[in-house]
Amino acid sequence: MNRASALRRVIVVSHLMRILITGVSRGIGRKLAQHAIDSGHEVLGCSRTVPEGRPFGGRHFKVDLADTVRLSGMFRQIRKEYGSIDALINNAAVARMAPFLLLRDEEIRRMFELNVFSAFNCIREAVKLFRRSCHPYPSIINLTTVATIYSLEGQMAYAASKAAIEQATRTLAHELAPLNIRVNALGLPPVRTALTRSVPAEKIEALVARQAIPRVCEFSDLVGPIDFLLSEGARMVTGETIFLGGVK
Ligand SMILES: NC(=O)c1ccc[n+]([C@@H]2O[C@H](COP(=O)([O-])OP(=O)(O)OC[C@H]3O[C@@H](n4cnc5c(N)ncnc54)[C@H](OP(=O)(O)O)[C@@H]3O)[C@@H](O)[C@H]2O)c1
């Protein structure tokens, strides 16, 4: 057995994963990638710009996911270099927050292109690589938002794009279960990142006040649910969207 296959065997036996995370240059994706690396997983990540902060400990692909040709090229490269992946975290997204009547068609399209179509394309391509994986519990996690639950004014298009992801999570759970692939989503209340920087502080405070646990969600609050959804312990959990903070 050569060194690479020996390492792969250790990874599979210990249930460590090769995880592809989209949108790793900053914010939640950057921290998720670092957490996964620190936990011993092998991380492949992508974004249009290089990851912020300390050197990225995984393999980074500089890709605009809205460009379907580049997206397919990245998956081809992953297949060539690694053969398979064991998990996908669909994290990359954009949000343009404005009343619907002030939103231009191309702004809505941009959100749907990344938040929906790129996420769907990543799932389609990832499933092909999952089929080459020998990990016992491959899974997909999609990131979504409380904006779908709260029907927040000024977030119609963003929430609609994420509602599509939540529906896909439920349906794909059924379609992919025969392939031993679980699909879940994590619904986040406000987290301080570039995405929420333009939201006025009083709006964030009002949103947080509606939560059963009325405080701003920190990155450390996501770690447990993400680790759980990827783990053997969640082997019967699929088609679920877990919302943090108590928002239903
Ligand atoms: N922050 C919150 O309060 C909050 C609340 C609910 C849900 N969420 C969800 O959590 C996820 C992460 O959000 P965040 O707050 O961390 O956002 P963020 O700070 O804006 O980061 C978004 C990431 O996506 C990448 N990205 C954007 N467009 C891309 C493209 N065309 N191709 C490839 N990568 C692209 C960005 O990198 P580049 O710009 O370098 O490409 C960046 O790494 C999103 O799905 C979001 O909807 C966030």
Image: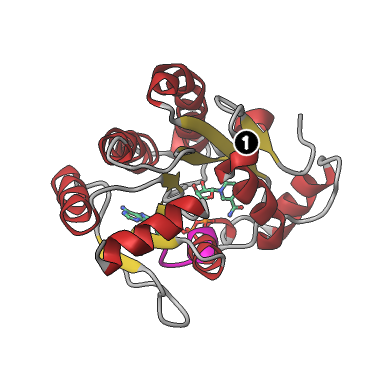
Q: Which residue is mark 1?
A: 234
27 within the magenta span: yes
Residue sitting at x 71%, y 50%: 203
Instruction: Give 239 or 146, whichever is nearer the viewer.
Output: 239
Residue 132, above or below 76: above
Asked if residue 45 is positioned above or below residue 174 in the image, the reply reads below
Disc 1 residue type (three-letter): Ala
Residue 238 falls left or right of residue 71 = right
Asked if one can make out residue 39 in the rendered structure from this viewpoint, the answer is: yes
Whether label 1 lies within 8 Å of ligand 1 gets the answer: no
For the N terminus, the image quarter is bottom left
The boundaries of the magenta stretch are 22-30
Residue 175 within the segment the image draws in magenta = no
Q: How many marks?
A: 1
Secondary element under disc 1, as helix, strand or loop, is helix
Q: Quadrant of residue 3?
A: bottom left
Residue 23 shows up from this direction: no
